[in-house]
Amino acid sequence: MTRKTFKGVIKLDIRDSKADWEPFLPPKAPDGAPNVLIILYDDTGQAAWEPYGGAINMPTLQKLAENGLTYTQWHTTALCSPTRSCFLTGRNHHLNGMSCITEGANGFPGWSGRVPEDCMTIGQMLQDNGYSTYWLGKEHNVPEQDISSGGPKSEWPLQKGFDRFYGFIGGETNQWYPDLTQDNAFIDQPYGPEEGYHLSKDLADQALQMIRDQKASNPSKPWFMWFCPGANHAPHHAPREYIDKYKGKFDEGYDAYRKWVVPRMIKKGLLPEGTAVPDFNPMPDDQANPGDYVKPWDTLSADEKRLFARMAEVYAGFSEYTDVQVGRIIDYLEKSGQLDNTIVFYCSDNGASGEGSPTGSVNENKFFNNYPDSLEENLKYLDVLGGPETYNHYPTGWAAAFSAPYKMFKRYSEYAGGTCCPMVIHWPKGIKAKGEVRNQYHHAVDLVPTILESIGIQMPDSYRGVKQHPLSGVSMKYSFSKDGPTEKKRQYYAMLGTRGIWENGWKAAATHAPLTSKGHFDKDAWELYNVDEDRSESKDLAKQHPDKLKALVDAWFEEAEANNVLPLDDRTAAELLGLERPSTEAPRERYIYYPGTSPVPEGVAVNVRGRSYKILADVEIQDASCAGVIFAHGSRFGGHSLFIKNRKLYYVYNFLGIKPEQKLVSTSELKPGKYTLGMEFERTGAGEHGESLGKARLYVNDAVEAESDLKTQLGKFTLSGDGLCIGRDSGDAVSEEYTTPGTFKGGEILGVGVTVEKKQYLDLEKLAAAAFAVD
């Protein structure tokens, strides 16, 4: 914000001086400026939701679609952090340093995981134009190493132009036991699932509180709210009554679902007549990622069909339950007279997710640990899917079905299955059309220009002394009045080694699967589609139009140069997530922790993966009833914990939630006194899937009280959250031997030290070698 020139008069005496308040007044929004509400779901293709012809009831979205506009060719980057950065700044994701998720950041301009100063945010733009700004729910644009109480806050919401934040920082969180942040501090959830807690409900409660508070004090001031629920990202969690509403609705399977839903999409006018439905597995055998394979429904066993159908029911219940919570916000805006002049964007950040593997999972963390799922293990959780006992994700078949009629799903940016997403816009004061369809081609970078034009303001040329990079997108406001030709001319795509480019109705796509570590991008075969006529990209026209294809490939490289796209990276999830990254605190061999602190996020906590390690605690037991958690990191879906129960010392390493828990228990009872309590793990080798194998010993002072073989995880305990705790266990308990918070009582923890072997083992198979690095 540029301060206006002072035009008053300053003399020695106030009586001879003339005040001028103008330079000191806070900015005011244009008269009649609308509120802006963005509802951004995760991991949802067009074919999932009722307004697009899908099977999932979305009463709030349906109401908005019937009174607004439904877009058929609205696109994203194919992954969450990059798409959200486009929403945040209006620039292409590589310009924002968001080549992929922040956990995959690397030391290149397009990969840094930090939004540069020349890409100011929509929050900053609107703050400087008299808006209140709020962000709720998911925030996946903070570098992993910055997610800590003492770390840098430059990328956190309040430093990016938002007055308030309430939600979780990271890629996902447990919906029953979320890792919550309020403004700039980590907090505990207000109540538990046994009292009716679910994150979607909590977020709606907080959103309503923020709006009510603002209108109570500043009723004339418009607001901007970015509402980002955890839905529909894994883990798929929902109240049982919402899941059961869909019982039997997906029993015919994902093959049948696609054949059912695409004609409905055509009938609604959302797809052209004759739109083809490509095969489930369109990638060539030499390129395909086995983890993204779709098993034909008719080849499944009866147990697999039963499990997979229930997983789809859980996903549907999760989506509808969250939509109902959003409905509470919409209802309040209507009752309070605000809805008429509120622009509502209701959309998703990428196509449906294939991270559940071909067999689905009751614990998605297995995917991030390169560990296979077992049908026998998964079936044990059939009756509790979606509840606190699971961290579930459906199989790839449902990802492909819910992204119909397009090929592939999330992470695949060369095909529309990863990028073509639902978008409904509702603004009664600014959009006269009701229930109409819009076919203009647009992208997530176009949202910020649309908001600015709708309000009637412009992004400044410079911000805080830094010349701003021009917006990458174009406004969609012209489409509010009628359907017709798009005013967008070109959009490139690049994600995890996949890439493509759209220009004037034509699309070039390089055949390359993500997360395969195959490289050789110069040998990629390029396909060509006329998407104006062939929306599902089913007819490759490369041989018929070689000149057109060459022009588009050249255009992709032009965009890559202009947007910091290179280098391309298709390495495996373990390689990406396991890369050691610079931090304000260098990795060390000894870590000391004390009770009374907030959970330490995994990105900055001691890293025991692939190493021998020791945990030693100085503890004073003051009475015989002393019990509780000494050290805990992770959750029931992966983690480890040292605790006292029934006067005995326990160490549990919960390996990816697979039962029985790996457990060591002291033989002797702990009497009042001062102790050094702890354990050590001596790594001796690697298992079939890269997990560490070795021997664990439990100590009371110098005595070995228990000894056992132990295996530890290749990858992280969670993608985000469930941090390291001393004296309690936040969120969901690591061990079934206690319930959270398991607060340590009847004694005092003086401190806990964790020592790790300096070397992380590099003499393993390629996966482990890439995932781990020497300090």
Image: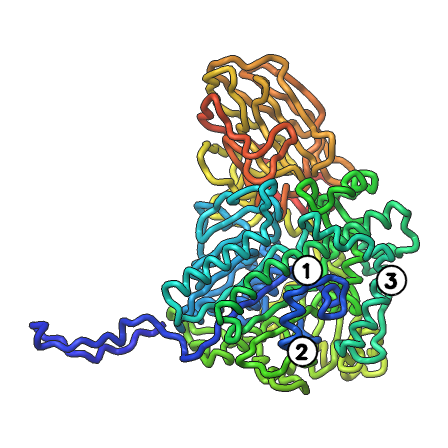
Q: Is residue 517 visible?
A: no
Gap between marks 3 and 1, in whole Å?
A: 21 Å
Q: Earlier in the sequence, mark 3 or mark 1?
A: 1
* Residue pictured at 62% horizontal, 34% vertical: 734
Question: Is residue 672 shown left or right of residue 75?
Answer: left
Label 2 belongs to which residue? Answer: 435
Return the x and y of residue 705 as percentages of the image width and height. 62, 16
Secondary structure at numbered mark 2: loop
Nearest-to-viewer mark from 1 and 2: 2
Mark 2 is surrounded, within 10 Å at the Cα level, by few (under 14), some (14 to 19) or many (20 or more) other residues, namely: some
For the residue pair 204 and 728, the one nearer the viewer reads as 204
For the residue pair 249 and 509, the one nearer the viewer reads as 249
Above-or-below relation of 751 to 132: above
Q: Are marks 3 and 2 in contact (CB under 8 Å)?
A: no
Label 3 belongs to which residue? Answer: 256
| Res. 601 image quadrant | top right
Label 1 belongs to which residue? Answer: 43
Q: Earlier in the sequence, mark 3 or mark 2?
A: 3
Q: Residue furthest right?
A: 298
Mark 1 is surrounded, within 10 Å at the Cα level, by few (under 14), some (14 to 19) or many (20 or more) other residues, namely: many
